[in-house]
Image (cartoon, rainbow, N blue to C red):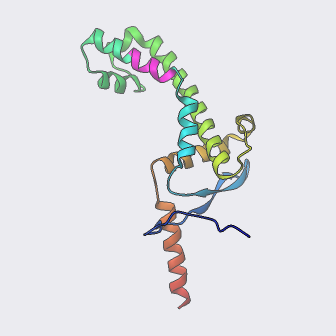
Amino acid sequence: MARKKKGLPFVVQPRLAPIKEVIGTEESGQIEIERKGYLTVAEKAISQNAVSGDESVKAVYAMAGTIARDTGKQVSEVMSDMMQEVRPEYMQPWDEDILALIMDMMVYQERVNLINATALIICRVDPEWTVKQSMELHPDLVTGLALLFRDEDNRSTEALQAAVDNTEGRAEGKQ
């Protein structure tokens, strides 16, 4: 006897259905991946677990705290000033340390992009996918997947709504 696939007993079904999104360029190749309008718990967990032990972010906050203490400024103001292309003069004594931290943060962001791309591939395309395979991907694919991850994390539904509007527009045109 075949078992019926069980689902949640929705009283109201989700408003927007997932769509297929094309990621990549002609140079990198293009893949199709589902856009849902949100990240699943698994996708978020993979990303958060992979970056949780990274010291880069902690080092930036520690440096901002040190500068704030020494200058009497607020940590939030120091953080903002640290990320400026031209930093205020009060930061001059820490300039080399700040530059090193910024370089570390750039490397950190590349790692985060790779991890987020991998999380989407594992959860939406191929559960057997590995980080090693992601490291061999063209940078355009990693960037595209990382941007999709960010959109999904922000629960952006613009693309899903556009697909609904497009479908409704075509249906109206046929009548």
Which residue is the extreme one toward the bottom?
175
Q: Residue at x 53, y 42 (%)?
A: 44
Q: Residue at x 66, y 47 (%)?
A: 121
Asked which quadrant contains residue 74, the reply is: top left
User: Nearest the camera: 162 or 124?
Assistant: 124
Q: Residue at x 72, y 69 (%)?
A: 2
Vertical order, 92 against 158 (above or below): above
Tally the marks: 0
Which residue is the extreme one toward the front?
1
Would you say 70 lies left or right of 3 here?
left
Quadrant where the N terminus sits is: bottom right
Q: Position of residue 68 (x, y in %)?
A: 30, 15
User: Nearest the camera: 150 or 72?
Assistant: 150
Asked which quadrant contains residue 107, the reply is: top right
Would you say 57 lies left or right of 65 here?
right
Q: Residue at x 74, y 34 (%)?
A: 132
User: Nearest the camera: 24 or 15?
Assistant: 15
Q: Position of residue 63 (x, y in %)?
A: 40, 15
Vertical order, 163 against 109 (above or below): below
Magenta-drawn stretch contains 6? no
Vertical order, 175 against 165 (above or below): below
Q: Position of residue 112 (x, y in %)?
A: 57, 34
Magenta stretch: dominant secondary structure:
helix
Q: Position of residue 87 (x, y in %)?
A: 37, 21
Which residue is the extreme one toward the left?
72
Question: What residue span does the magenta drawing correspond to?
Answer: 56-63
